[in-house]
Image: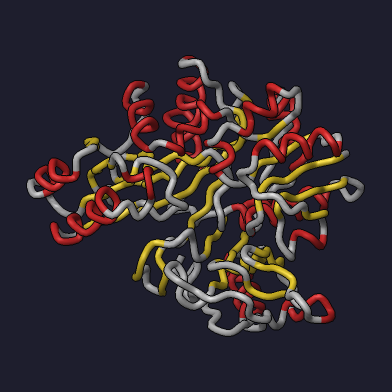
Amino acid sequence: MKVLLIGGGAREHAIAWKISQSNPYCDIYAAPGNAGISQIAENISVKADDIDTIVEIAKDLQIDLTVVGPEVPLANGIADRFNESGLLIFGPSMAASRIEGSKIFAKGLMNRHGIPTAKSKVFDDHSLALQYLAQCEMPVVIKADGLAAGKGVTVAESIEECASAINSQMVLKEFGSAGNRVLIEEHLEGIEVSVFAFVDGSYVSPMVAACDYKRLREGDVGPNTGGMGSYSPPPKNVWNDYLDQQVRVQIMEPIAKAMAVEGFPYQGVLYAGLMITPDGPKVIEFNCRLGDPEAQVILPRLKTDLLQVMMSVARGTLAEVAVEWDPISCVGVVIASSGYPAKYDIGYLINGLDDVNSNVFHGGTKFAEGVPDNHIVSDGGRVLTVSAVGNTFEEARSNVYADVEHISFTGSFYRSDIGLNC
């Protein structure tokens, strides 16, 4: 069995790790991979969005299944290209990926099919957006329409913050064309939960939930990031069997049906970012792939063979596979580079990787050039995710922080409150 994994972050390392655990004789290739992934797969030096080259690699290597980690190749149509070439791929089509690639498209889809979500308005003119915001009750949520690496959302507490967000997104084009249009939403009150399910076009698998931490610093302050840590499952007062069934019936199955009815059935892993409000769960956003850092805490809980699940999704036979999630707890902590999510330096030697018992999923890492003994250095903003399991939540949290303390590099930092008071 040959698997080609697209991407080079901690999410992709977790996917490769999970596949290799249950399929030790599977040959895994990663494009482009990273230093951690290279220990269980063969890295190929090609960018994740170089679709033409990736298709040719899959043909040349006679790959049995290609698994796409990040959203950009999916939004650019990699699944369509593979399907046209007769190659099996795990990941939704370009049309289905619009559920993440355009927040405005996703909002329209939800509104057409009665899926609970925040009220919103769309603007393509920054002055009209500011006029509207001047009449709004604060706080409001301002979202760039397109892909922005998880950073195109601002929760604005004042008209000054609104003006700053609109200026950066629509005028200064901080996120490029993603900010040509913006979505202005009501601010939902409640507890945020990430929910994941495998979908093969019609069948929605049993779901799994996690909570992540987007803000940079302890106490949920500082700028938004791609995620500084996560845990799964949420406590019973946040996520339970009743909510699981409610979300399945009101959100996950209806959105899968809606996409099939409108002509772009969804095949892949569907990620719903939800707010559990006093009025029930409402959708904040959908994503067309596993989350990062959520993948690093939910995949250790997956009891079913991940490769079997992904193959069945790609073939449209998911209903034949019993997807099971272990009740154990898992906590993940991201170790980041000083300056992240803004400008940061790379190339610092990472110490302590051999001194831990937890899973260490590499995000931004590489092997140092010209240095013996294969020393691993930092090569990104979010460098590592340390992920630990436990029979109780407290045990998992204790395990992960005991190991995080052993790992360091120049300027490294992490949040010390992941899972605190949960």
Residue under the point 46% across and 38% down:
100
Which quarter of the picture shows residue 82? Answer: top right
Q: Please state the horizontal and vertical placement of residue 408, each as a whole percent of the image.
A: 62, 82
Viewed as shown, does residue 36 lie left or right of 166?
A: right
> Can residue 205 be spotted in the picture?
no
Q: Is 192 placed above or below 79 here?
A: below
Q: Please state the horizontal and vertical placement of residue 126, each as a whole percent of the image.
A: 19, 45
Residue under the point 67% across and 64% down:
362
Along the line of sight, which residue is nearer the eye, 197 or 354?
Answer: 354
Q: How many marks?
A: 0
Q: Is 315 placed above or below 179 here?
A: above
Along the line of sight, which residue is nearer the eye, 77 or 26?
Answer: 77
Along the line of sight, which residue is nearer the eye, 314 or 233?
Answer: 314
Along the line of sight, which residue is nearer the eye, 356 or 104?
Answer: 104
Residue under the point 69% across and 21% down:
84
Viewed as shown, does residue 142 lie left or right of 37?
A: left
> Can residue 183 be spotted in the picture?
yes
Q: Residue furthest right?
A: 25
Which image quadrant: the N terminus? top right
Residue under the point 44% across and 52% down:
150
Q: Please state the horizontal and vertical placement of residue 317, each as a whole percent of the image.
A: 72, 23
Colouring of the image: secondary structure
Q: Please state the horizontal and vertical placement of residue 300, each as a whole percent of the image.
A: 69, 55
Q: Is 392 placed above or below 318 here?
A: below
Q: Is 359 placed above or below 277 here?
A: below
